[in-house]
Image (cartoon, helix red, strand yellow):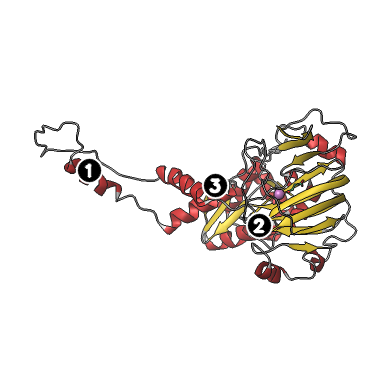
């Protein structure tokens, strides 16, 4: 696939400048002659697995229903208006992963996953908005999208899913296989299947500041160092024993003001936080673990690749992988950064790593984070 069709002839930079987080873009034939990457039955199989997040949304007797997977059984194919949503398909399918990788002109720290929805005729998840940007790629069959820039994002109360109270569509399009619709966050939309259809959502992540703040305080709890204990050798007798004294308040406030954090604390926190795999991600360690010497030999010849499930980032002197951080020397850092960007490192690059870095790679291999060859 040529890059130029992906964004309808726009360069990534132009797309980001004019559309990203700003306004929708409909791209006819972003993926010319697109064929689904995963058969319907394979998708249903994924939805039956414990480590795959899936949801089933249906309308029965004019009522919305939501069930969470895994699903041993799904409604009949001839039953109308149900949708199966399968999250994180890129973690389980190489072709889905390769599709998601085409969107890596946007940083990994922002890219979330590939969700696939399967719907029977008239199926959809109702008019709603999402908090994140999304590319909606029509993979199979047709879907009608209605979209709106409306400010009124109030939701109907007491429903199992988020449905807009007053959806006022402003534009509508029918998407066919290979067509793709980009929507910025908070943009109201409603997609309805015209016959059986499959839609791929290329999803993004953007942590809320509250969520980051709470996680940061937890992270800092492990590293703050406030020696000593409260003392009051000058304590005076009181006739208001229930009052917290100025003496106590001032001393405690002064001690707590010593809690500080540095830019490196923020770097390490952010890298560990953003590289943390989701709770339902399990790695597959090699069935036949290799000794360090054997690993070094094979990796030096064939190189290594990151597991699809591995999240690897870097910033300054720090390298982050699956929620852990490490500091290396400049040469190792350059090579590990290349591993993170390319998601592979060839034999000659492996031979240029320090013995410490090879040992680290060996440990990652034992955990199933990287594969050799
Ligand atoms: C779908 O694929 O049915 C829903 C995707 C969305 O509206 O975000
Ligand atoms: Co949506």
User: Is residue 137 among the parts visible in the rendering?
Assistant: yes
CB under 8 Å between discs 3 and 1: no
Residue 143: x and y in percent read 84, 51
User: Is residue 351 among the parts visible in the rendering?
Assistant: no
Which of the two residues, 162 or 133, is positioned nearer the viewer here?
Answer: 162
Residue at x 82% of width, y 36% of height: 44
Tag 3 residue: 324
**Above/below status of 256 relative to 333:** above
**Above/below status of 226 relative to 58:** below
Residue at x 64% of width, y 62% of height: 21
Which of the two residues, 158 or 81, is positioned nearer the viewer here?
Answer: 158
Tag 1 residue: 249
Q: Determine which of the numbered discs, if any, sits on residue 150 in the image.
A: 2
- Disc 2 to disc 3, C-alpha distance: 42 Å
- Number of residue marks: 3
CB under 8 Å between discs 2 and 3: no
């Amino acid at each position: 696939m040529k890059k130029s069709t992906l964004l309808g002839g726009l360069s990534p930079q132009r797309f980001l400048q004019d559309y990203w987080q700003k306004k929708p873009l409909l791209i006819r034939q972003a993926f010319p002659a697109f064929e689904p990457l995963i058969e319907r039955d394979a998708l249903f199989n994924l939805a039956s697995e414990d480590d795959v997040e899936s949801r089933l949304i249906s309308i029965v007797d004019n009522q919305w229903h939501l069930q969470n997977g895994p699903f041993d059984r799904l409604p009949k194919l001839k039953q109308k208006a149900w949708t199966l949503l399968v999250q994180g398909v890129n973690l389980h399918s190489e072709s889905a992963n390769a599709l998601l990788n085409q969107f890596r002109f946007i940083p990994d720290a922002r890219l979330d996953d590939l969700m696939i929805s399967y719907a029977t005729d008239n199926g959809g998840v109702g008019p709603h908005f999402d908090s994140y940007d999304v590319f909606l790629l029509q993979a199979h069959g047709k879907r009608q999208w209605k979209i709106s820039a409306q400010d009124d994002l109030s939701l109907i109360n007491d429903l199992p899913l988020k449905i807009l109270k007053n959806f006022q569509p402003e534009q509508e399009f029918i998407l066919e296989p290979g067509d793709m619709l980009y929507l910025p966050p908070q943009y109201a939309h409603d997609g309805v299947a015209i016959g059986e259809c499959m839609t791929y959502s290329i999803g993004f992540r953007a942590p809320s500041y509250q969520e980051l703040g709470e996680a940061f305080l937890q992270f800092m709890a492990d590293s703050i160092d406030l020696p000593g204990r409260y003392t009051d050798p000058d304590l005076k007798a009181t006739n208001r024993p229930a009052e917290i004294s100025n003496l106590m308040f001032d001393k405690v406030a002064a001690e707590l003001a010593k809690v500080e954090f540095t830019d490196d604390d923020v770097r390490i926190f952010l890298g560990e936080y953003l590289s943390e795999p989701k709770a339902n991600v399990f790695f597959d360690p090699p069935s036949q673990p290799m000794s360090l010497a054997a690993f070094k030999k094979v990796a030096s010849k064939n190189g290594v690749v990151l597991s699809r499930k591995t999240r690897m980032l870097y910033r300054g002197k720090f390298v982050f992988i699956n929620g852990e951080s490490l500091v290396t020397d400049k040469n190792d850092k350059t090579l590990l950064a290349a591993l993170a960007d390319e998601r592979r490192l060839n034999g000659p690059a492996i031979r240029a790593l320090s013995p410490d870095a090879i040992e680290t790679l060996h440990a990652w291999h034992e955990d199933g984070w990287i594969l050799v060859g």
